[in-house]
Amino acid sequence: SYEVTQPVSVSVALGQTARITCGGNSIGSKNVHWYQQKPGQAPVLVIYRDVYRPSGIPERFSASNSGNTATLTISGVQAGDEADYYCQTWDSSTTRVFGGGTRLTV
Amino acid sequence: QVRLQESGPGLMRPSETLSLTCSVSGGSISSYYWSWIRQSPGKGLEWIGYIYFSGNTFYNPSLKSRVTISVDTSKNQFSLKMSSVTAADTAVYYCARDSTGVDEFDIWGQGTMVTVSS
């Protein structure tokens, strides 16, 4: 079965750049999507199909996907960005698969 | 603006069948895929399955034997049934609009907590 791996936690200072990785075998050949989840709330899509931002998501959120690693980058981190972030992709063996999530601490 | 709202029992006994409904407002259920996703307390997200508005379904292989998803286009709703629940099925259950059946979930409901306990 296909698995994707995320770091459990990432810490960043206010105003700096946070990078959250999502590792998987040849993940660069798959579409990767990213979700932000704040405590007690449903996940919110922040990046879809590797690099696209839904309407309403700040330009500070960007992403890339190549080789065995997809990366979500948050520039100029704000206090309100503190949340759990999940990557998600698709594989023929496991269908939809989510990473375990990364807690971003600002 | 499309909104999704889950409804169902909050507490269940082991071996019972879970039934949840997702009501779609602000838009038509037609021409989209619709998924169920769950999140166990303190854990990550697990995709359960999807239904296309026409009725075609696809399930997570790990849950396939216990899950049925159906759609009622006249009511703009879709539903989840999960049989023989155990404590391991305790989770927040989310319904979500599914862009293509293999890609992103672009709109989520607020989620409903289901607890399985004797």
Image: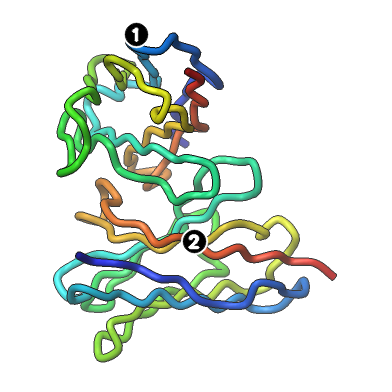
Name above or below for residue A87 compared with residue A39: above
Name above or below for residue A89 compared with residue B106: above
State the separation of the CA atoms marked 1 and 2.
32 Å
The answer to whether marks 1 and 2 sit on the same chain is no
Tell me the residue at 55%/67% (across/down).
B65
- Residue lying at the far right in this picture: please name it: B118
| Element under disc 1 | loop
Tell me the residue at 30%/43% (across/down).
A45
Label at residue A16: 1
> Please, which chain is the residue tagged with disc 1 on?
A
Name above or below for residue B39 compared with residue B23: above
Question: Which quadrant would the N terminus of chain B be assigned to in this image?
Answer: bottom left
What type is the residue that disc 2 sits on? Gly
The percent position of residue A91, horizontal first and vertical second, equals: 34, 40
Label at residue A88: none
Name above or below for residue A90 compared with residue A69: below
Mark 1 Cα-neighbour bin, 10 Å: few <14, some 14–19, many ≥20: few
